[in-house]
Image: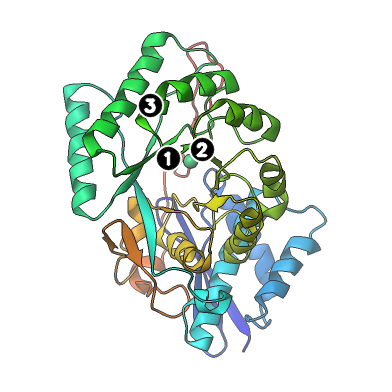
Amino acid sequence: MKISRIDQYAPKIRTRLIKITTDNGLEGWGETTLEGKPKSTWAAVEELADYLIGKDPLTIEHHWQHIYHSAFFRGGNVLMSALAGIDQALWDIAGKYYEVPAYKLMGNSTRDRIRVYAHWGIEDLTEQGLERSRDRLEHLQKNGYTAFKSGIAGKWRPHEPPSRIDQFVKTAYMMREWVGDDVDLFFDFHGKMTPSLAIEICNEIKGMRPGFVEEPIPQENKDSLEIVSRAVPFPIATGERLLSRWEFREILESNSVAFIQPDVAHCGGISELRRIASMAEVYYVHVAPHCAIGPVAFSSCLQVDACTPNFFIQEQVDAGLGNGLLQSDWVVKDGYIELPKGHGLGINIDQDAACRTLEFEGPELGGDEWFHEDGSVADW
Ligand SMILES: [Mg+2]
């Protein structure tokens, strides 16, 4: 069996897909969506296709090593996202070839079902804002969710007055009151805080018992994260913007996080997510894979979640369930998704919906222009 063609598609906003086809007609799908740099990753896949055409798709590890090591300049989010999509597609082919879900080729399942969380929060305290939040919560609970994560709205300067902080703290406590004590609530600071502001806010919300705060500060400086972690009385999570084992090594060795969140579409694919999770196990760190894009990346996460002993919970945005690209959507029940049963990634792509490339206007994949009131650049 040989790889005979590689195609790319952009069928939806925030969704870039790769399809690898073999000479005996198997098709493997992967997702290469890279927020802010979609054209760069598209070009990287085209370059890598020259190497892959004519090769055996089943030597996944060998191709991963070749793609990672053959370029003198390694890593970076463009190459790693392209490699991630290719790796997903090769695991999809392998599962279809051996007629099993991909996780069965990685030691089989370590659990019976996969816990997921949805995005929900209280963005503003106006009457309309509260009504929107209540409606969304009701909708999600009706659809089986028992765990939620909220972002932290707006731009944040190095210092904010008490009224700004108090408003966020009030919403956090209100969320706990609305859902009760049996529900997991997480917060994502999106790397928008300085260490001192993050420590101040985390200490203010500790009484509502968050499961973790994600990216309390930007991801580049693990020493600063260690300072935050030591001063915060509940778990810290990070890692959606870290790539490969080599970037996770430093975070793990600093013992500053309880949860890591590698992204299967950026960190190097199913193969690398699995290896990062194994490294984390040594540090008693659990894995909550990041996934804020489309259903192919989400389905790839489920394969790793199924066979990873130190898996904690899977992030899921609404688009991850299917978004019109799968013949049938993933279903959440009592907070869980059943183990995938289909071969490969366990999905059947809707070819009519997926095999097309639309033009999108504006900063469709992040990288928006976002400034403070004095004109300086803000983290978004
Ligand atoms: Mg995040």
- Say which of 188 and 128 sits in front: 188
Three-letter residue code for mark 3: Gly
Residue 21 vertical position relative to residue 113 in the rendered view, above or below: below
User: In x, y percent, where is residue 135?
Assistant: 17, 40
Q: Distance between the residues labelled 1 and 3?
A: 12 Å
Three-letter residue code for mark 2: Pro
Residue 235 vertical position relative to residue 116 in the rendered view, above or below: above
- Say which of 57 and 165 sits in front: 165
- Dot 2 alpha-carbon crowd within 10 angstroms: few under 14, some 14 to 19, many 20 or more: some
Name the residue located 44 percent from the left edge and 80 percent from the top edge.
343
User: In x, y percent, where is residue 266?
Assistant: 58, 53
- Dot 3 alpha-carbon crowd within 10 angstroms: few under 14, some 14 to 19, many 20 or more: few
Is the residue under label 1 in contact with that under label 2 (CB below 8 Å)?
yes
- Distance from mark 2 CB to nearest ligand 1 atom below 8 Å: no
Name the residue located 52 percent from the left edge and 12 percent from the top edge.
159
Asked if residue 25 shows in the view, the reply is no
- Label disc, if present, on residue 211 of the rendered structure: 1
Three-letter residue code for mark 1: Gly
Q: Nearer the viewer, mark 1 or mark 3?
A: 3
- Label disc, if present, on residue 207 of the rendered structure: 3
Q: SS for tag 3?
A: helix
The answer to which of marks 2 and 1 sits earlier in the sequence is 1
Residue 356 vertical position relative to residue 248 in the rendered view, above or below: below
Q: Name the residue under label 2.
A: 235
Q: Distance between the residues labelled 2 and 1?
A: 7 Å
- Distance from mark 3 CB to nearest ligand 1 atom below 8 Å: no
